[in-house]
Image: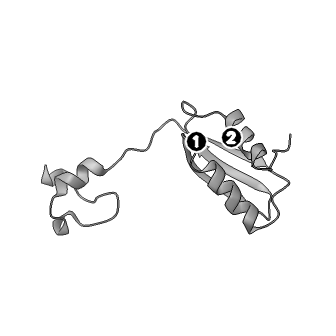
Amino acid sequence: MRESITRCSFGHDPETIADPVQVKETEFKVNEITEHVTMAVPEISCDHCVNAIQKAVGPLPGVLSVKANAETKKVDIDFDPSKITVTHIEAMLEREGYPVAR
């Protein structure tokens, strides 16, 4: 088992870890079925908006990453379509006061 571990997901050397089997069990696999969407959100105007969007959308089940940009007024989202839909994400943005441009 020890030979199969070359690096844990946090970049630690397994030789310095007391129980490498425990580290192996805590590693995760990235779901290969992901989608990316870029949404135009004209109401993004400042860092507060960026933070509000990231805090509202980021914790949603199925959202893997969210990056809002005040300069481009766009939100990039990677998500698992088996757990959340684009419509659900758009609804959350609208509820927070950031409707998506159509």
Q: Which mark is residue 69?
A: none
Q: Which mark is residue 89?
A: 2
> Residue 57: horizontal and vertical position, in percent?
64, 48
Residue 82 lies, with reference to residue 93, above or below; the image says above
What residue do we see at 24% from left, 67% from top?
13
Q: Amino acid at mark 2?
A: Ile
Q: Quadrant of residue 69?
A: bottom right
Task: Report the Cα–Cα distance between label 1 and label 2.
Answer: 10 Å
What residue do we see at 68% from left, 35% from top?
88
Q: Which mark is residue 79?
A: 1
What residue do we see at 24% from left, 51% from top?
24
What residue do we see at 64% from left, 48% from top?
77
Residue 31 lies, with reference to residue 17, above or below; the image says above
Secondary structure at badge 2 equals helix
Q: Quadrant of residue 101?
A: top right
CB contact under 8 Å: marks 1 and 2:
yes
